[in-house]
Amino acid sequence: MSKHRVIVLKIVAGELSVTDAATRYGVSRRHLQRLLARYRQDGLDGIKARSRAPLTSPHTVTERVRDRVVQLRIALTAAGTDAGPVTIAWHLGQEGLRAPSTSTIRRILHAAGLITPEPRKRPRSSYIRFEAAQPNETWQSDFTHWRLADGTEVEILNWLDDHSRLLLSCTAHRPVTGRHVVDTFLAAVDAYGPPASTLTDNGRVYTARHGGGRNEFEYVLAVLSIRQKNGAPNHPQTQGKIERFHQTLKRWLTARPRAANIPELQTQLDAFRDHYNRHRPHRARDGLTPATAYAATPKAAPAGHDDRAHYRVRHDHVGSNGKISFRRAGRMHHLGIGADHRGTPVLLLADDTTITVVATRTGEIIATNQIDPDKIYWRNTMKAPGRWPGASKT
C-alpha cells in the first residue's frame, strides 16, 4: 500500500489530523487536502499517482510530419542524393512544414527501420578542417572514373569552389587531357571570374613540375597571376572536399540508368550540377545551397584582375617571318613576335584587350600584343616600334 493511501486512511479514520499527518510524513498540508478531495470524489483509485506530463504539447511531432520524414528519406535515397536528418529538415522547411530537431528526425528514421548502423567513426572534433574564407579564394579540381552502359571507361572532370562548394564545372571526357583542364578552367573563369588560387593533385594534366617543366595549365595560371597549390603525393586528404564530392556524384549517377554515350552522360551531369548547386542543402554550409553560399560573400580574385576579361588559349609556333597569324571576329590579324623567336613553340593567351605569347619550352613571356580591330598588324609591345617586314621603304 502506498504512503499516500496510508495517510489518507488514517486521516479519514480519525487517527491523525491533517496537520499531524503532514508533520509525521513530511507532506505539505496543501497536498494532503488535494488527496482528500480526490478520495472523496473517486475513492482510493483517486489517490493513485498521476502523470505530471501536460495533456497537450505544442512541440509534439504531428503524424503528417512523421509520415513526410519517412517519405523524404525513401525518395531522397532512391534519387541518389543526401537523405540525412539535416537535409530532410531543410526539405520540410521548403515545403512549409515545421521541422523537428535533427535528433527527433533521427529517432523517427530509427523507428521506421530506415537507418543502417555504421561502424563507429572518428569524432568530428578530431578533424582539422581547412576552408577558404571567400568564394573564388581557392578552386579544387580532380577527375574520377565512370563506365558507360557498354562498359566503356570515361572520366569526369570537376571544378569545385572550396568556400561555397559550388560546382563550377562538371564535364565528361575520354580521357581527360591537359587541354580539357585548360578549356573547362577558362570557361569557369568566364562564368565566375578567376580564382586567387587552385588546389589539385600532382597529375600530369595539372602540373609538369616533377618533370622539370611546365604544362599548358601552369602557363595559364602564371599569366593570370593565379597561385597554384598541389597536394602532397599520396595524400588525397589535401583535396578532401573534391574527393568527398565524387561520392555524392557517383551515388546520384548510380540511381539513374547508365548513359549510353558521352553526350548522354553530359546531359545527366548538367542536371546533377543544377540539382547540386541550387536544390540540395550542403551540411558543410549550415544548410545553405552552394549557389546561395557562393552569392552571400564577396569574391576573392588574383592581384590586378579585371572583372570584364574573357580568355582564349591557343597553341602555335612563330613563323619564319617572326609573326603569328591570329583570327578574331572573322578577320585575320598578324602578331609581331620577333625574328629571334622564329620556329619557337608558343602558347597564346588572349583576353579582350591583349594577347600574351609564352614560349612553351622556357615559360618566358616573349610578346604582348594590344588588340586593335581596325589594324591588321599588332606589334609586340615588349619591343621598340619597328618597320613591318615587307612594308615599302620611305
Image (cartoon, helix red, strand yellow):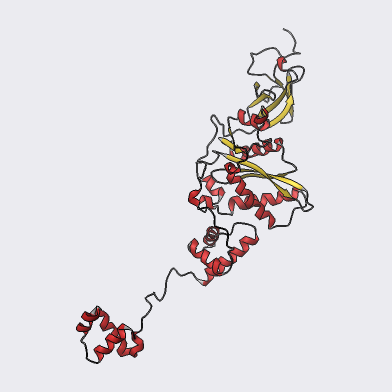
Residue drawn at the location 25% of the way across and 83% of the way down:
33
Report the residue that reaches farthest toward the right: 150
> Residue 15's x, y, as percent?
22, 90
Residue drawn at the location 70% of the way across and 35% of the way down:
178
Using the rendered image of the protein, determine whether residue 327 is visible from the camera's viewpoint.
no
230 or 373, which is in the foreground?
230
Asked whether, in this view, residue 360 is left or right of residue 34, the answer is right
Count every numbered label the image shows and give the total.
Answer: 0
> Residue 306's x, y, as percent?
56, 31
Q: Quadrant of residue 256?
A: bottom right
Residue drawn at the location 68% of the way across and 29% of the way down:
211
252 or 379, which is in the foreground?
252
> Residue 348's x, y, as percent?
69, 27
Q: Is residue 187 above or below residue 147?
A: above
Using the rendered image of the protein, determine whether residue 365 is visible from the camera's viewpoint.
yes
Asked whether, in this view, residue 63 is left or right of residue 204, the answer is left
184 or 329, which is in the foreground?
184
Report the residue that reaches farthest toward the top: 394
Q: Is residue 76 above or below residue 290?
A: below
* Image quadrant occupied by the N terminus: bottom left
Q: Is residue 130 above or below residue 379?
A: below
* Image quadrant occupied by the C terminus: top right
